[in-house]
Image (cartoon, rainbow, N blue to C red):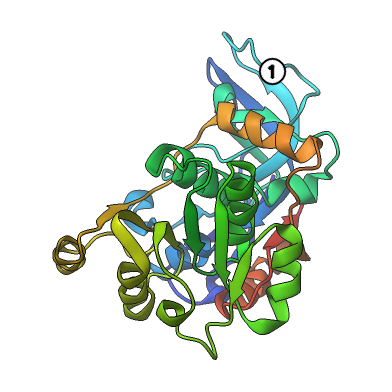
């Protein structure tokens, strides 16, 4: 099978098309013919030697965790899927799923049926971003009807789904984004949008129950602590929780949690139901061929993507 591998850490140029042996499913696993693979910030960070590089170890390895495709073979003990099923998932994370390839194998229960109204390209854009947003709001934060939430980087892959999930859960949603993306975010369901280029977040909002920081800079973390009400929660995604941040949060009378997404086929089934019901939309800004993975990494790293980038395989 064809795949994109790298033999060293570095820039996008280290990503090369290679021929690898097709994997075989073990008991409880499925073999999926990959039709599309989503591209996420953790991919290029890992390529550079950061991100999940500490989990994957030294190259060579195949990047990618977002998968949409068709089940071609099932291992012994698989009861939830059958050959021919169209599925999507985020298998194995943070271990290697090797999604930038023509085939992947993974436990059947880490996949769900693809939303019937989406193409494979659209479905491949959802798993990592969708599970991140869903698990933050439901499991980490326990977001309740009527609560107020701020989402930093609301127009990004995770952000635009978090806006829609938060509205589905009954929250009042505030997002940060450049001015050009405000109308789109309001159409997705945001109640307020702040242009972070021209307005200090702490001057534009406050009394928030939850802040989802998808940027993790010193500026956004400091702003997040200022706009939370007493006892409010900051979920710090890229940055985690340093001792300094914990101290600052305690002094401000708020809580802070780190976060890392995990595979969840059941949650993907719930997300698929929302998509099929028309309550959630996925934005794919650009589609690349497998051989153009390096170019997709270059575009994503510039930080201006609206929604997601996807490799069509």
Q: In this view, does 10 lie to the left or right of 236?
A: right
Pick the front one: 5 or 266: 266
Give the residue at x 71% y 65%. Answer: 186
In the rendered image, the quadrant that contains the N terminus is top right
Give the residue at x 31% y 75%. Answer: 222
Q: Is residue 65 left or right of residue 275?
A: left
The percent position of residue 218, horizontal first and vertical second, equals 31, 78
Number of numbered callouts drawn:
1
Pick the front one: 118 or 288: 118
Q: Is residue 245 left or right of residue 141?
A: left
Residue 286 sits above or below residue 202 on the image? above
The percent position of residue 72, horizontal first and vertical second, equals 75, 26
Residue 299 sits above or below residue 210 on the image? below
The percent position of residue 66, horizontal first and vertical second, equals 61, 47
Q: How crowded is mark 1: few (under 14 residues within 10 Å), some or many (20 or more)?
A: some
Q: Is residue 262 left or right of residue 229?
A: right
Residue 179 sits above or below residue 56 on the image? below
Q: Quadrant of residue 306?
A: bottom right
The percent position of residue 197, horizontal first and vertical second, equals 54, 88
Pick the front one: 236 or 8: 236
Q: Note whether residue 64 is visible.
A: no
Q: Mark 1 — residue? A: 81
- Label 1 sits on a secondary structure element that is loop
Q: Note whether residue 281 is visible.
A: yes
Residue 226 sits above or below residue 266 on the image? below
Pick the front one: 143 or 28: 143
Give the residue at x 20% y 60%. Answer: 253
């Amino acid at each position: 099978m064809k795949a994109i591998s790298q033999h060293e850490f570095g820039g996008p140029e280290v990503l090369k098309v290679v021929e690898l042996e097709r994997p075989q499913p073990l008991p409880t696993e499925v073999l999926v013919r990959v039709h599309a693979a989503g591209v996420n910030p953790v991919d290029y960070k890992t390529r550079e030697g950061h991100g999940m590089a500490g989990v994957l170890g030294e190259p060579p390895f195949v990047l990618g965790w977002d998968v949409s495709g068709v089940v071609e073979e099932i291992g012994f003990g698989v009861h939830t899927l059958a050959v021919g099923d169209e599925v999507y998932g985020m298998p194995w994370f943070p271990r290697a799923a090797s999604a930038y390839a023509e085939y992947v194998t993974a436990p059947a229960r880490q996949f769900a049926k693809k939303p019937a109204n989406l193409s494979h390209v659209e479905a491949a854009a959802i798993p990592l971003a969708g599970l991140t947003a869903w698990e933050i709001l439901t499991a980490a934060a326990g977001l309740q009807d009527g609560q107020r939430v701020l989402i930093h980087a609301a127009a990004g892959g995770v952000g635009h789904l978090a806006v829609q999930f938060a509205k589905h859960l009954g929250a009042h949603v505030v997002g940060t984004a450049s001015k050009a993306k405000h109308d789109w975010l309001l159409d997705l369901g945001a109640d307020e949008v702040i242009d972070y280029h021209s307005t200090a977040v702490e001057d534009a909002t406050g009394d928030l129950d939850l802040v989802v920081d998808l940027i993790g800079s010193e500026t956004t973390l400091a702003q997040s602590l200022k706009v939370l009400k007493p006892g409010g929660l900051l979920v710090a995604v890229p940055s985690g929780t340093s001792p300094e941040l914990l101290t600052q949060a305690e002094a401000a009378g708020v809580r802070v949690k780190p976060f890392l997404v995990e595979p969840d086929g059941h949650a993907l089934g719930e997300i698929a139901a929302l998509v099929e019901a028309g309550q959630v939309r996925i934005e794919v800004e650009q589609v690349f061929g497998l051989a153009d993975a390096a170019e997709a990494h270059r575009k994503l790293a510039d930080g201006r993507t609206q929604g997601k980038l996807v490799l069509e395989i």
